[in-house]
Image (cartoon, rainbow, N blue to C red):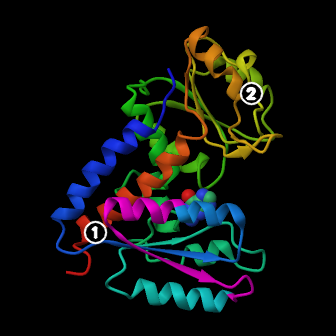
Amino acid sequence: MLLDARPYVEEKIKELKERVNKLNKQPKLVIIRVGNDFASGKYVANKVKRCEEVGIKSEIVHLDENVTNGEVLKKIMMLNNDRDVTGILLQLPLPEHLNEEYLTNAIDPEKDVDGFTIANMGRLALGIEGNVACTPRGIISLLKYYNVELQGKNVLIINRSNIVGKPLTHLLLRENATVTVAHSKTKDLYDQVLAADIVVTAIGKAEHFDTHDFSKDTTIVDVSINFNEEGKMCGDVRKSHYDTLIEELNCNVTPVPNGVGQMTVIELIEQTIEIAERTNNGN
Ligand code: GUN
């Protein structure tokens, strides 16, 4: 089956609109963008569009490429102390001269909609409620929406980043899956791909995997957003092989576009609303 995110997103938008209507005050998401990275600009625009659809406020703080650590920190502190601000997102990657780890961690954990602070990552690892990284959240929501069983399944995650691999490991353990995390130094990667029930790939290589790499009945979650030689958006799995994977090997595949990327944005909006609901933000 093609695990298309669009039906989930459509239903979710309706639900989120109703939840926003029940609040006394509109939640507000602030996105800090530094410099002019092209991909970041597109991602930020998608996030703002979804905020509008659901009826929450959003603001982009667009800082100059040459801004200092101190200036970004000052802005984050102002937003931490602003009672009208529900969630703060520092769009990554930052320019080289900025300290990504330090600045990310300066965000108030309660307003950290990305779940990237030490406090929220620690909470996730310990199984305590907190804000959780949006892409891993979206992967779990999409798999549950399509009734993909997780309990007892062998899941191979090909990514060990703080944004995807690490938080997803903890969410999958919570669902009683057996998790293997592979990375660039992993031996026998292709044997592991063949052996897994569920493969989550975020290697970032355009159309790297095809039908021959997977066994029958595998669920394939493609997290990457790449561009192929024709300049078309694609994932790590060859798009022209989706049909054979689904029809001949009975696999599930999340498409790119309209898969995990859409889920990340909707989870971000939902987490902003959750923060407003939990903290009675601004009231
Ligand atoms: N850059 C790419 N993905 C993300 C994300 O989920 N959050 C932030 N803040 N930056 C990103």
**Quarter of the figure with residue 205:** top right
Which residue occupies the foreground of this view, 270 or 179? 270
Q: Is mark 1 within 8 Å of ligand 1?
A: no
- Rounded to the nearest angstrom, the CA distance separating label 2 from label 1 is 41 Å
Q: Which residues are magenta?
A: 46-68
Residue 11 in the image: state x and y as whole percent: 31, 42
Q: Residue at x 20, y 56 (%)?
A: 18
Amino acid carrying label 1: it is Ala
Q: Residue at x 78, y 45 (%)?
A: 231
Amino acid carrying label 2: it is Phe
Residue 209 tag number? 2
**85 relative to 71, above or below:** above
Q: Is residue 282 visible?
A: yes
Residue 278 in the image: state x and y as whole percent: 25, 66
Residue 69 in the image: state x and y as whole percent: 67, 86
Q: Say if the magenta span includes residue 51.
A: yes
**30 relative to 143, above or below:** below
Residue 276 tag number? 1
Q: Say if the magenta span includes residue 170.
A: no
Q: Is mark 2 within 8 Å of ligand 1?
A: no
Which callout, 2 or 1, points at the residue further toward the start of the chain? 2
Q: Residue furthest top?
A: 248
Q: Residue at x 67, y 42 (%)?
A: 202
Q: Considering the numbered disc 1 on the image, is that residue within a helix, a strand or a loop?
A: helix
